Image (spheres, grey):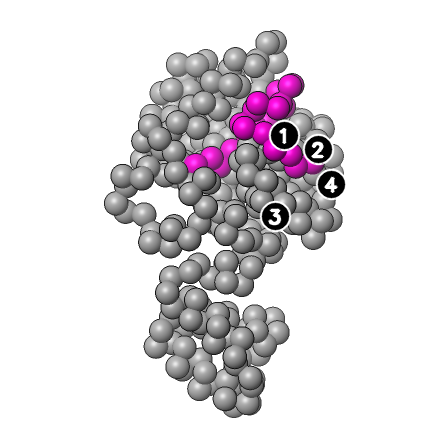
Amino acid sequence: MKLIEWVKQAKTKISTLDAELIAMKTLGFSDRVGIIMHSDEEYDMSEADKMLEKRAVGIPLAYIMGEKEFFGRVFNVNQNVLIPRPETEQMIYSVLGIVDAEKMENPSIVDVGTGSGCIPITLKLELFKDGILSDIKGVDVSLPALEVARENAEKLRVNIEFFESDLLEKIDTLPDIITANLPYVDLDWDWTSPELKYEPALALYADDGGLKLIKKLIDEASDKKNDDRSRFMVLEADNSQLDDIVAYATSRGFMLISKDEFILAFKY
């Protein structure tokens, strides 16, 4: 089949962008220019057809293609991990800002609920670009998720320790910075994307209006702190939850230092 004909047919079932991305992936094109230049050529599109049918029933494209870009790098993903999202990139900027403002020379960071490992791996690489060596770890309760994180660390040539831990359970010494994109979706919300049904429920949903695990993490960090040295926590949550999280964290002695659309940064 000619490529232009396949794309035209695919567009009746899925978006133009998704159709082109599937064609690029299966045919090995690095960008849309390949589609334009080779539009009249004949190709075996059987593999693209398989991806098309999966996308047509709502399976997220990232899972179909097995990868997702985050902060300019491509991470492996499967249905054991959340798909990295653009809003999470703000967490990277928040942490880099803290390291710079506090003049940290060798920051220690633990990413809780690490999933694909996109947060700690990105931080390690971005800090290194700035000439800063860091001690970064990633923890998760899901062993399959940790396998994906380790694959990504190897793929991107980053030395990070990933291990199983229920929040801070196996963290003996608090790091300088805790990052966490924990489950925060409330099952009662009626505005979530239908595609969420394909992502791991363990990484998405939490009780108490979606705040159970975030509050528990705040409690654990507060309880483990046994000195006067300042530490930091950067959290992601839905915009509708931010005020409640700030109120709860403040009650536990945390001080808000920045607030963005989905990201909160605290000093404690």
Residue 56 belongs to the span the image colors magenta: no
Q: Mark 1 points at which residue?
A: 109
Residue placed under numbered mark 2 in the picture: 134
Q: Which of marks 3 and 4 is in front?
A: 3
Nearer the observer, 196 or 144: 144
Camera-near label (3 vs 1) is 3
Residue that numbered label 4 is attached to = 159
User: Is 134 displayed left or right of 149 in the figure?
Assistant: right
Q: Which amino acid does label 2 sit on?
A: Ser
Residue 129 in view, yes or no: no
Dots 3, 4 in contact, CB < 8 A = no
- In 3D space, how far apart are the residues under numbered discs 2 and 1 (Cα atoms)? 8 Å
Left or right: 13 in relation to 110 = left
Which mark is on residue 211?
none
User: Label 3 to label 1, Cα distance in Å?
Assistant: 19 Å
User: In the orientation shown, which residue stands out farthest toward the top?
Assistant: 227
Question: In the figure, residue 225 lies in which quadrant?
Answer: top right
Residue 121 point in image, percent of width and height = 64, 43
- Tell me which corner region of the image, top left, top right, bottom left or bottom right, holds residue 259: top left
Which SS class for mark 2?
loop
